[in-house]
Amino acid sequence: MRAAVYHAPGDIRIEEVNDPRIEEPTDAIVRITHTAICGSDLWFYRGQMDYEPGARTGHEPMGVVEAVGSEVRTVKPGDFVIAPFAISDGTCEFCQKGLHTVCRHGGFWAAHTDGAQGEAVRAPLADGTLVRVPDRAEGDEKLLTALFPLTDVMATGHHAAVCADVQKGSTCVVIGDGAVGLCGVLAARRIGAERIIIVGHHEARLEIARRFGATDVISSRGDEAIGGITELTGGGADHVLECVGAAGSMQHAIQVARPGGTIGYMGVPHGVQAEGLDVMGMFFKHLVLRGGPAPARAYMLELMDDVLAGTLDPSPVFDLTVGLEGVPEGYAAMDQRRALKVLVRI
Amino acid sequence: MRAAVYHAPGDIRIEEVNDPRIEEPTDAIVRITHTAICGSDLWFYRGQMDYEPGARTGHEPMGVVEAVGSEVRTVKPGDFVIAPFAISDGTCEFCQKGLHTVCRHGGFWAAHTDGAQGEAVRAPLADGTLVRVPDRAEGDEKLLTALFPLTDVMATGHHAAVCADVQKGSTCVVIGDGAVGLCGVLAARRIGAERIIIVGHHEARLEIARRFGATDVISSRGDEAIGGITELTGGGADHVLECVGAAGSMQHAIQVARPGGTIGYMGVPHGVQAEGLDVMGMFFKHLVLRGGPAPARAYMLELMDDVLAGTLDPSPVFDLTVGLEGVPEGYAAMDQRRALKVLVRI
């Protein structure tokens, strides 16, 4: 079979790799129909994170079950399934608490098993990890494209809103107009936030934000942006979704939060440790800081219900679709900001 | 009148100062009977924080009302009163939310008005700031000494437990055996924590911790301490009270927290910004970070009820009592760790 393989920063190639096979009785083999390139894939692509040369890439799998191990109970060959960006058993202490991304026996796709940017993957802990997509969605490409972001970005945007404690009728600020920030807007609207202020600098993305429910758009930078938000909110917002994952955006989040407010931070906070986090600022404003890799599996069913009901559609975050052979070009397009998020249709 | 005045690091003197007078109709004048030296006073005493030469010191006032402005309604001359370490109006948006330490019109004693280490103070926003001590406590020195820590350390220990989301039956770790850490133990026990593990290095203080309800004491350091706690808790505690306020203790808190756990951090986090906070560690463990200057006023009545009922007595944190002229020696004793916390009886 063919799959994307990392060689060096900027160098992803489609190559022949071994077919996956059942290794544990809890495994399933999934033939991928939909996958994607994630903003977090750009870290190794840009050389900002170590990655093993020769390792497979991608962590957003959707497709058809081809085979299952002897202990798999919840899916069978022929089922159409979606999986979150983390593998989880669904039964351990942390999964029971809805923290599937610290599952005692789980892990992340490319590190724990195959990467998802390929023709097929071995899916460990299939009963915990895979979620069956209702039959009526199969073949409905529009619906499948709307469901697919639940693997990662939509779940992460939702987690940002949950961590920021967004409430019905509340005012929130979403920092970042990447795919996660846009999904954060959608999640905040879904929860019922009354005022959703997004901070970003790309007109096309901000236009999607408006469609997703943003009530105010701040495209200025630095102190001007902070001043604008402070004025709009009469002194800061109770709920801030930090959807960039960088030192500067964390600082902005602290500055636009209202005293006593909560910051939900998503994305791995690159550079924060080196550049320092304004803990003193957080302390004197009584801010709550909450974040982590989104437990997408915990949110999957409730979000899927809304997608199937037609009330939730994050698919506009995809502005480029490629085939498997187009994956290297997809990375380049996202790296150069020619694409917001790339869907890979196999 | 006489009061403590800061001159330079290590140089606090008792001097003649102007008597306080009513300046605003919401002011009261309080003759101090009890005050104290706080661990946070050591920052300027040690030159770790800028402080204005000539400025008054101290922020823990208790005593008798001598005069009130024309708009003061809740206290009158002759009333025995206690006040938290922050002034607050009790009516603004943040006071209504229980965040009295970000009151829109309040501030801290020595910065906003007189310092409390003196014979009397002007108490601004008296209706919001001062709390009347029930008549039966007057003259009962033992009871007054048990009530007095509500001005600061007991409220701060309680806030640590509240921020760490300590629950009945839960397991928590208290990092630090200073007065706030010891009060954190007391607060955790009061809330009903089943297992309270304290980390500290001073035998006499740890003995107080045991009396206050600590079930386990960890006096080793570094990795050994972390390993010990991880073993005791089977992988970390859901609730961590960080009661030191330094980069190293914040790091310990992150390391001993269980995935999904909450860190309540108290004390101003000195050095954290410079040395960096392990945000990556917090992120991948899904930790919640919550802290701020304790809204002592918000907790005052509920804690006072328990002290009056005889079920709460934080007074063992005082291991040295001095008169006003003994304040400079009290600072030296705390600086040299000869005293845990100094009560000043005027």
Image (cartoon, coloured by chain):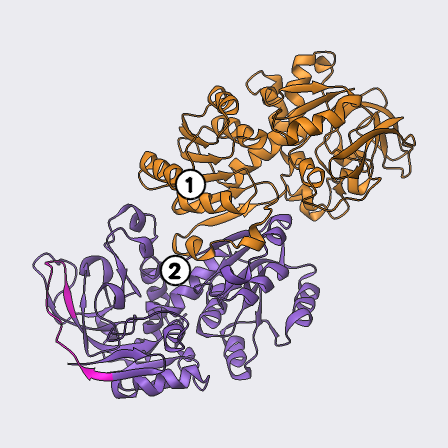
Chain colours: A orange, B purple
Identify which amino acid the numbered label 1 is placed on. Answer: Gly
Residue B310 picture quarter: bottom left
- Check chain identity for marks 2 and 1: say if they share one: no
Quadrant in which the N terminus of chain B appears: bottom left
Residue A230 located left or right of residue A275: left
Residue beneath the point at 85% across and 35% down: A27
Residue A2 in view here: yes
Region of the chain picked out in magenta, as a range: B14-29
On screen, B158 above or below A206?
below
* Rendering coords of residue A127 (x, y %): 78, 34
Which residue is disc 2 drawn over? B293
Quarter of the image containing the C terminus of chain B?
Answer: bottom left
The location of residue B121, given as percent across then percent down, is 19, 71
Which residue occupies 43% across, 84% down? B339
Q: Which mark is residue A222?
A: 1
Magenta stretch contains residue A167: no
